[in-house]
Amino acid sequence: MNDAEPLLRLRGIGKNFGPVRALSDIDLDIPPGQVTALVGDNGAGKSTLIKTISGIFDSSEGEMFWQGKKVSFHTPKDATDTGIATVYQDLALCDNLDIVQNMLLGHELRGRIGLLDEITMEQTAKKTLSDLRVTTVRNIRQPVGSLSGGQRQSVAVAKAVMLEARLVIMDEPTAALGVSQTALILELIGRLSSRGIAVLLISHNLTDVFQVADRLAVLFLGRLVTSGPLSGFSTGSAVHWMTTGAAPPANGGAAQDREG
Amino acid sequence: MTSGNHEPPKQEPAELITSPDASADLLANSLGEYVRIVSRRIRAGESGALPVILGLVAVVIYFQVRSSLFLSPLNLVNLLAQSSFIITLGMAEIFVLLLGDIDLAAGFTAACAAVVALWMLADGFPWWAAALVSLAAAAAYGALQGIIIARLRIPSFVVTLAGQLGLSGVLLVLINSAGSIGNGGVIALQNSVINDIEGGQLSPIATWIVMIAITAVAGAVIFYGDFRRRSAGLVAPPVSVSLLKCGAIVGAGIVVAWVANLNRGRGTRVLEGLPWSVLVVLVILFAWTVLLGRTKFGRYIYAIGGSAEAARRAGVGIVKIRTLAFMLCGLTAGMTGIIYASYLGSISTDVNGGQNVLNAVAAAVIGGTSLFGGRGKMVHAVIGGLVVGVIYNGLELLGLTASAQLIWTALVLLAAVIVDRLTRSGSTT
């Protein structure tokens, strides 16, 4: 894999729900180790696109290439096995299980006589959490239901990292969080990309996006209208792309910055 | 939660309150802290077993005041014998309650398994063959229910309600077609081994040996587990808390062995020693506790009960796990059938499988298992089963009618469910 080869390459992805055309002709490259922000207004097709990438939906048309090789996902497990982990908005955690149990759910380790090897599992989970510097949870045997929103998000991300994901898709990770918790998650995203893990970040919050993203991709009514390095956008021009699906006028995006 | 933490540490106690499933012994650093965490939870209605045990003690005191016979050795041992089939049926229910399901047919699964076993014994089969076939039949029936519920995604309430009606009919058909064996709608138990489960006892010396062995093993398991965690560099419960637990286990063992070894015979007949049924219940309790707490299967049951969607995304085969859970529920109901037949000395068309199953669910819920899935332990069936057993036994001693027993059990069940609901709504966000 050379530098020019993206981690994940989408070509001509389209998706119909009956007569409704949710996505059409999406071409998107996700480079390794970078944070790609996927933005767009409600109904632009962000969720449909990530569900296609993470194997929940079969795409109606188009092709996906993982490190240059053609892949197709029919179940979430296909995507996870390839190295794509998705942290859903609802987090998909079991509130009644503790942090270790959640992080290793579906990947439990067993000892000599087939019983669960709790000690090795706890050490593995502990190591991943400290690598990501998720350290203030008092005891990782606490049930996830007792954690704060940011802590739950961190557990979900750590779970993805522990499963050796190369690409972590995060769906609105900061939507339900307060200021300090949001800062934690943005730090965590930065740490993922510094570890060479690519992040596809879906967010409404342009402040967050401009803080952590390396690249920006804008969806508008099911089409990818623009994508590129973040340096090519300002908040104003991004909002213009999101709300109209067209490039801002030449005199700059600042005048369009209506929604802040 | 990173090293540059933004939260004042004072928030932590609030977090602890909202976690009914966190084991306090791992959160606490000292005995004092352990006591504080436990008491804080009790005040928040997230109590664990302690209030139920205190309630049990209160009920026992009440019955003892009303009838001095209640705490006699004979009655206490009767109580254990009476409770054992409620306890095992409660354990059967816990497998499916943890998923958020219920098996209303389990009472009649037990009765039908008992018919199969007693019929085979009457036909001259050895006891182990009768037990194996009846248990296999019960497990197969449970698996059938599980397949219908999990594959076709039909609520377990409806499927097992149909099962309850259907099996109560099957019970009549079986007993009535047993010919000379099923004389007058009753099949008598004709095997000393099965009969000894409820009717036989260990010698006093064996009782002490067994109780000492059980408490020693339990203590060793607790301390060895702590030792392994500590030497792996993980947080372990404070030594004082583990000592407290061991002390409680030893205390309970001594009391049970001492009471069981008092002579409870009438007149000149000497009757002493631990009933086999207690040992049978403890063995089942141990096996199912390991299965739920220490295996992948058990972990997945809790995961599905907590969030089926999260479990599915983690790659858990939900259909398979649910089917297996219903199969184990059927299997444990089959064991209950054999214990029940041993208790009655026969099995008849009068078996009230519907009431038995509701008592079993009551036992599980009173003990602390949630009706809504995800929370519960096998030991809850023991605690709750003893509560139900005490109520039945005590009201019987006071000479109250069956109607009073039903009403009191219903009230206790209702109280337990309300507590369950309130705890649940307080803890989930």
Image (cartoon, grey):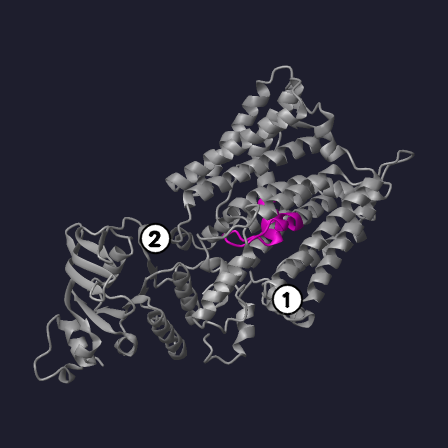
Q: Is A227 drawn above or below residue B367 in the view shown?
A: below
Label 1 element class? helix
Residue B112 in the figure: left or right of residue A170: right
Residue B162 left/right relative to B274: left
Residue A157, image quadrant = bottom left
Query: Quick one: quadrant of the C terminus of chain B?
Result: bottom left
Nearer the observer, A260 or A2: A2
Highlighted range, magenta: B359-384
The reply to whether the magenta stretch includes residue B169 is no
Tag 1: residue type? Val
User: Mark 2 = which residue?
Assistant: A81
| Left or right: B309, with B259 as reference point | left
Residue at 46 percent of width and 74 percent of height = B1
Question: How packed is label 1: few (under 14 Cα within 10 Å), some, or many (20 or more)?
Answer: many
Q: Residue at x 58, y 31 (%)?
A: B135
Q: Residue at x 31, y 50 (%)?
A: A78
Residue A182 to residue B125: above or below: below
Residue B418 spot, x, y in % from top left: 55, 57
Return the residue nearer the eye: A148 or B295.
Answer: B295
